[in-house]
Image (spheres, rainbow, N blue to C red):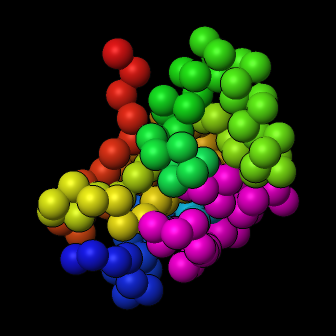
Amino acid sequence: MSTLNLNTATLISNRALAVGREIGAAPLTVAMLDAGGHLISLQREDGASLLRPQIAIAKAWGALALGKGSRLIAADAQQRPAFIGAVNNLAGGNLVPAPGGVLIRDEEGEVIGAIGITGDTSDIDERCAISAVESQGLKADPGVVG
């Protein structure tokens, strides 16, 4: 697979919401972006708060824009706050440096898109994203702090 299509994005998004329900997560919002950063799908569960769509999109977009999962971007924000602040200015404030933005890679390791989830703790958001991406036989790349 060289692109992330609507069907696959919807399957991933639906699975992410299902995982959230299985583990008792707070209402989630899931954004699916293609490799160019364009929104493919967005789902917001009943009860999700007002800014959740923008946060989900920003987590996924940041991962694509910087080429790494938002867990690494969060680590960068702690270690290099001036850099992440400058990047966020360049991005028009559309970068959320918190786990939950996960790159989606195909079987060859090429980035084909990203998922952004928000609504619960960042670790729960990320857990739902990884499980959902892997359910479709794709590779989830959240970034590993090491």
Looking at the rendering, which quadrant does residue 4 occupy?
Answer: bottom left
The x and y percentages for residue 84 are 69, 29
Looking at the rendering, which quadrant does residue 113 occupy?
Answer: bottom left
The x and y percentages for residue 5 are 39, 84
Taking the image as drawn, is residue 117 in sight?
A: no
Report if residue 56 lies within the magenta region: yes
State the extent of the magenta-drawn residues as a range.
33-61
Report if residue 46 lies within the magenta region: yes
Looking at the rendering, which quadrant does residue 15 occupy?
Answer: bottom left
Q: Looking at the image, which residue sits at the far top? A: 79
Say if 115 sits above or below 8 in the image. Answer: above
Q: Quadrant of the N terminus?
A: bottom left
The x and y percentages for residue 97 are 64, 35
Q: Quadrant of the C terminus?
A: top left
The x and y percentages for residue 13 are 45, 70
Q: Tell me the residue at 65%/22% (across/down).
A: 77
| Nearer to me, 40 or 135 | 40
How many numbered marks does the figure carry?
0
Q: Tell me the residue at 53%/39% (across/down).
A: 70
Q: Tell me the residue at 46%/60% (across/down).
A: 114
Residue 20 located left or right of residue 131: right
| Nearer to me, 14 or 134 | 134
| Nearer to me, 111 or 8 | 111
Residue 136 located left or right of residue 50: left
| Nearer to me, 103 or 132 | 103
Taking the image as drawn, is residue 110 in sight?
A: yes
Say if 9 sits above or below 109 in the image. Answer: below
Q: Looking at the image, which residue sits at the far bottom? A: 7
Residue 33 located left or right of residue 11: right
